[in-house]
Amino acid sequence: MRKIFLIVLVTIVSTLILTACASGNENASAKAVEDYLKALVAKDETRLSTLSCGEWEDEALLELDSFQAVTARLEGLTCEQTGTDGETALVLCQGDIVATYNDEDQELDLSVRTYQVVQEGGEWLVCGVR
């Protein structure tokens, strides 16, 4: 009886550890996108570059250029990993980027894009959108 109890206990602990690791990866990929969006509205070119994979960096900087003439802020930002495509994590965000130009606000809905996030050098980096 004691042997069965130990087997069940080890199985439960192993499951909890694996679940925690999987959740950590999902949280890390979502956090990478949140950090990317924060760097974008802060117009932090250096940080935006470090949060982008090599293939996406030029696109990220083009996106940054589109915000140069406006004041931008994030409202209601939350991101969540919604799945994977091979080794790419798919992250969907809720909330808006509010861009202000000449005292007029334009809301950009973040939920219309799914961010592709990959691990490079042990870091989660934004590497495209769908």
Image (cartoon, grey):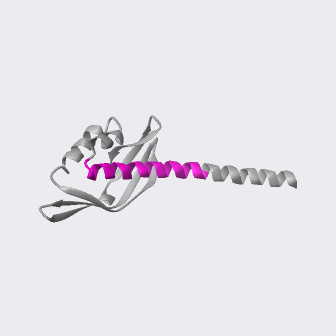
The residues colored magenta run 19-43
Give the residue displayed 29% in from the left and 38% down from the top. 57
Give the residue displayed 34% in from the left and 48% down from the top. 36
Q: Quadrant of residue 76?
A: bottom left
Tell me if I can see residue 53 in this picture: yes
Place of residue 42 in the rendered image (x, y in percent of width and height, measured from the top left): 27, 51
Q: As drawn, is 24 to the left or to the right of 81? A: right
Residue 97 belongs to the span the image colors magenta: no
Give the residue displayed 23% in from the left and 46% down from the top. 64
Farthest-out residue, left: 102
Q: Is residue 7 above or below residue 104?
A: above
Q: Is residue 113 above or below residue 122?
A: below
Place of residue 26 in the rendered image (x, y in percent of width and height, measured from the top left): 49, 51
Residue 35 belongs to the span the image colors magenta: yes
Q: As drawn, is 99 to the left or to the right of 36? A: left
Q: As drawn, is 52 to the left or to the right of 8? A: left
Tell me if I can see residue 130 in this picture: no
Place of residue 1 in the rendered image (x, y in percent of width and height, measured from the top left): 88, 55
How many labels sit on residues? Answer: 0
Q: As drawn, is 90 to the left or to the right of 4? A: left
- The prevailing secondary structure element of the residues shown in magenta is helix
Front residue of this view, candidates 25 and 82: 25
Place of residue 19 in the rendered image (x, y in percent of width and height, measured from the top left): 60, 52
Give the residue displayed 40% in from the left and 45% down from the top. 117
